Amino acid sequence: MKKSAKSGGKGWRFIELFLAAVFLFSAAMLIREGSRYFRERKANQRLSERIGREREELSAAGGTSSPYASSGRLLIYDGLWQENHDLAGWLTIEGLGIDLPVMYTPASPEYYLHRSFDGEYAQSGSLFLGESWEPEANYAVIYGHNMKDGSMFGELDRYQNPEYARKHPVIRFDTLTREREYRVLTAFYSQAADSSQEDIFRYDQFTGLEEREGFEDYLRQVWKLALYDTGEEAEYGDRLLILSTCSYHKKMGRFVVVACQKAEI
């Protein structure tokens, strides 16, 4: 009996050591993950602050000089573009604290899925445009990760609430040559579709929007899924801005915000 008790004590001691090791490993992983998120957020914050300073300097100039560089690009973004030619624009959503560069790599659209502005690995990645985007097109899809720490599009699903959408209707997406302001139409839930699924609205792969029939068909599909109607109207000739992120309401789920723009700022 004494031998059995001693053996049992050793067994419990082993379990305690194992659980302690698991706890320490998990804690180390959480610290590592938190540190990574912090570094990535700080890097994006520095970019935002840099653009903020550019805005302040241009505002202080009071319109006495051209907002354009000799290249034809907006001065506010020209410096960043010189550092990385993949820069395509800038997205600002004040209510969500989004003030971030938007990247575009036509040969490999998801290149920045897990890369920061400088091209280094980043779990949160960067905001990026979908394939076949053109600066003057009437349709743009911007993708971003639904990050646990709220960065990137981690808080985009606030727009599932119609009251929030009505109180925060403005989304600004500037290209390198145009400053543009959009207003939220609606939001909806969907899912990523593969080639075998024919009954899913391919909101990010829709074609023919340059034609009236295609544009109006796209809007009909949007309103079938719409969570609400802000009262804003979109018609052929307006630009549509689509913001897309992951959602966990179903497998391969997506949450999508749709906004429209009618005039330059």
Image (tube, rainbow, N blue to C red):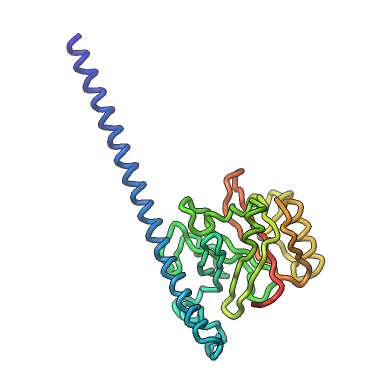
In the picture, which quadrant includes the N terminus?
A: top left
Q: Residue furthest right?
A: 213
Q: Measuring 50% from the left and 77% from the top, which residue is drawn there? A: 85
* Camera-side residue of 246 and 34: 34
167 left or right, relative to 38:
right
User: Could you tell me residue 254's position as x and y percent?
Assistant: 61, 51
| The quadrant where residue 233 appears | bottom right
Q: Residue furthest top?
A: 1
Q: Measuring 60% from the left and 69% from the top, which residue is drawn there? A: 172
Q: Measuring 57% from the left and 64% from the top, which residue is drawn there? A: 93
User: Could you tell me residue 144's position as x and y percent?
Assistant: 54, 59
* Camera-side residue of 11 and 78: 78
User: Could you tell me residue 157's position as x and y percent?
Assistant: 59, 52
In the picture, which quadrant includes the C terminus?
A: bottom right
Q: Measuring 76% from the left and 72% from the top, which residue is drawn there? A: 237
* Camera-side residue of 40 and 67: 67
User: Could you tell me residue 123's position as x and y percent?
Assistant: 44, 57
| The quadrant where residue 45 appears | bottom left
Q: Is residue 250 above or below residue 256?
A: above
Q: Is residue 148 above or below residue 170?
A: above
62 left or right, relative to 14:
right
Q: Is residue 233 above or below residue 20?
A: below
Total residue callouts: 0
* Camera-side residue of 263 and 208: 263
